[in-house]
Amino acid sequence: MSYEAIAEEINKNQGKFIARLREAVAIPSVSAEPERRQDVFEMINWTEKLMTKLGVKCQQFENGQETLPDGSSIKLPPVLYGFLGEDPKKKTLLVYGHLDVQPAHKDDGWDTEPFELVEKDGKLFGRGSTDDKGPVLGWLNAIEVMQGLGVEVPINIKFVFEGMEESGSVGLEDILLKHKDPILVGVDFVCISDNYWLGKSKPCITYGLRGCCCYSVEISGPKQDLHSGSFGGTICEPMNDLCWLLGQLVDARGTILIPGINELVAELTEKERRLYESIDFNLGEYRNDIGVEMLTSDCPKEILMRRWRFPTLSVHGVEGAFHGPGSKTVIPCKVIGKFSLRIVPNMDPSDVDKFVVSHLNELWKKRGSPNKINVVARDSNRSWVADFTDDHYKAGIRAIRRVFGVEPDFTREGGSIPIALTFEEMTGKSVMLLPMGAGDDMAHSQNEKINVVNYIGGTKTLASYLLECGTL
Amino acid sequence: MSYEAIAEEINKNQGKFIARLREAVAIPSVSAEPERRQDVFEMINWTEKLMTKLGVKCQQFENGQETLPDGSSIKLPPVLYGFLGEDPKKKTLLVYGHLDVQPAHKDDGWDTEPFELVEKDGKLFGRGSTDDKGPVLGWLNAIEVMQGLGVEVPINIKFVFEGMEESGSVGLEDILLKHKDPILVGVDFVCISDNYWLGKSKPCITYGLRGCCCYSVEISGPKQDLHSGSFGGTICEPMNDLCWLLGQLVDARGTILIPGINELVAELTEKERRLYESIDFNLGEYRNDIGVEMLTSDCPKEILMRRWRFPTLSVHGVEGAFHGPGSKTVIPCKVIGKFSLRIVPNMDPSDVDKFVVSHLNELWKKRGSPNKINVVARDSNRSWVADFTDDHYKAGIRAIRRVFGVEPDFTREGGSIPIALTFEEMTGKSVMLLPMGAGDDMAHSQNEKINVVNYIGGTKTLASYLLECGTL
């Protein structure tokens, strides 16, 4: 039975697959909202039922409790594990996906009800449509079609679907460690479909992710907020100090001004440079989409490298200072600046921490303020880059070429999916990101959508990829 | 009948006067919170009732409508006007006060319920106790005692009590203009009890106020907030620009770095310098009260001058950026920095505006960012300094000397009470500030209080002042 038959059958089932996605989107499995926690459990049960129908042997691994800000405690959703096939002669693929979604409310600015899948102009609008319910269903749709046509799935597949990805994957790593057997034992390669094409029309394979180091710098002075009229002029104001510090971290073009940071960045190799040559990236479109007249560079390749393989620093905000509309003439007593660096190979978070803290302390000495400073390195996760030339990636190329008739772009993501690195480290095997959605899908934002052609084409890609994995 | 009899009677009525203040504090007349607007009306009616009992002829002058940020409209509280005595042979005093208060919620960090007056260690805690319900009641208590003792009030008194002072005195100036007759006609001097002693033990008379110029500087870039991972590195980030700008307005010691500003400040005269010589100001106590180890100067006189007769600049906060606890890795698309300058003679707000805008534009040119800048000069009010040697001020000195047996300090306030200047300009007469509360009363802050000795002693001071005005 050829791939073409599978593709045709997928086309025929388009209506059914969209209806299936509609059912999934209708379960508002928002992990960040405790009052919707039950829906996350429901989404996991719904998926388990579907997998069981396909012959996947499922098991839910209990997660612990989550302590809410009010001190109360709430159950974490389990991790849904399943396996299809145990043939020792076959290779084993680990598929990861997540069943929870970002919060969404119609009055955030959605044009439609976020938890009702609405089809319009070939687009399927709804929270979770592209992140990550569409891709998760893509795997199951592909398997269902293969089984229906009597095509043997040529590999064993293990599934790990979690319900807390949008809330920091709480508990997942512990469960992977605790249940290394059966989850990770015997795995030969890992595939994750939870990111996006670079643009809107050309598929890609993603081989790298930036990491992230978050910092807070707290400046504290008087013991309480003070009236700027009554006290202004007599004390050294924490907010004035903080602005001075935050203003010296990065220049107008985004160059990081912290000594030592830029020297940590891995050299661009010739092999890597060549990946950028054929990439389909329209700078004008990118500029228009985000609504700016000028980017930090006019060169498309340079812009991509700045997103993917160079570090950046963003100041996110200030805690403790006035943030409402209008005026409030108060001297805040304690202000906390928040900024983060997106890091890349070979930046180790501990080196980055060292340089950031030391730069701020140097500046602070220069400032000569009597206020107190406290620099805290908060969460961090490392960057990840795969060997994009291995056989697993070659299988990915063939899978895409067969579906779309083009060579995929090789991309990285500027953001972080920490689990990719976790799987690589825990299995020691090749991890590949095989995105389904388009670059304008607006995951996490209002009016999240997946294009019908991406959902259906992506299902074909995953089927094609399963076939290719059988040849490895 | 001597002043001593009045003072003794005030002492005897301490319990009654505290109960009266308790009633007033229990009305949560927060002008800034639309849902409490009705309480402002109630507070005005409550006060009118009390005044009417004392024979004050009252009238409420309708104010207009206020448009709320959501576009809806709400009634402004009226201005309560009243007069006691119309004897053409007597001088006429205008008394101003306000009946509204700052917002307060127990969980802001109050030790007690803010709208329940709680007496502890000789202190009366409660929102509005010192700002400005205590002083307003002080006038009425004094008159009540004089009437009870059969002491003729030797002057005519006009009262102007408003309900929007904590929200910019919206509508007050219009009402004063519209009802110049009867409010301002025939007024010989103006007295306002709405500020504080310099320290905790020595009374003062206040002859000057700083003005205030508020600014916002808006930097806008992309059309929506962006994920710092996916987009960081490709755009020039508004928040990075804003921090750079805000960091260059003032140095660590509070010196304003905006060219032209410091040159506008009036020279210190010998007469003015002498006022500082006898002032009772304990720098160590001031430092302890606000909880800092170091001030911008070690010289008490210098610190006072920095509060009163030199300008300052405070950065208050940023609108549009992340301000919660924890981390949020977003690039805000539009951020608005808020800062203000406290101004002094001879700084005209229009000159200050010019220098501020021009400095920011100069810096912006240097920055070379493609983002858009919009500097807005918001509300401003001018500084005010009275002739502290006139007969009215001499009457004030005698009034205080009689109650406390000391010469009052002559102080200014670093903050603004724009109405002082308005009254001076509209009447052309001497305006004096005669504070009741102590310097540590924490108006506008958590745990606002007035000391029992200040409330009772202040009532005596106002009675003594009324008697002195009769000699002018």
Image: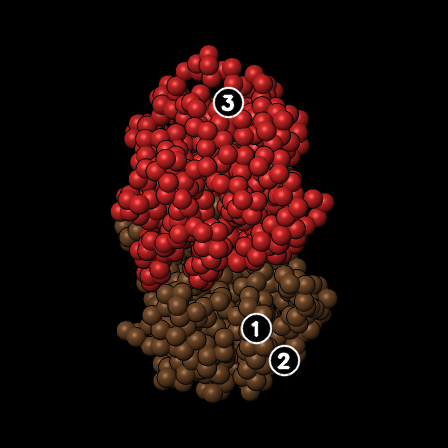
Chain colours: A brown, B red
Residue at mark 2 shares a chain with residue at mark 3: no
Give the quarter of the image for residue B445: top right
Q: At 56% from the left edge and 25% from the top edge, which residue is drawn?
A: B409
Q: Is residue B386 above or below residue B444?
A: above
Kindly identify which chain the residue marked by label 3 belongs to. Answer: B
Image position, residue B14 (x, y; %): 64, 47
Q: Is residue B257 above or below residue A68?
A: above
Q: At 57% from the left edge and 62% from the top edge, which residue is drawn?
A: A167
Q: Is residue A51 above or below residue A367?
A: below
Image position, residue B328 (x, y; %): 51, 53
Type of the residue with mark 3: Met
Which residue is label 1 attached to? Answer: A35
Type of the residue with mark 1: Glu
Which residue is label 2 attached to? Answer: A58
> Residue A413 or A255: which is nearer the viewer?
A255
Type of the residue with mark 2: Cys
Residue at mark 2 shares a chain with residue at mark 1: yes
Q: Is residue B175 left or right of residue A468?
A: left
Cα separation, mark 1 vs mark 3, equals: 56 Å
Kindly identify which chain the residue marked by label 1 belongs to. Answer: A
* Numbered disc 2: secondary structure: strand
Q: At 46% from the left edge and 14% from the top edge, which residue is drawn?
A: B271
Q: Is residue A367 left or right of residue B164?
A: right
Q: Is residue B265 above or below residue B35?
A: above
Front of the two marks 2 and 1 = 1
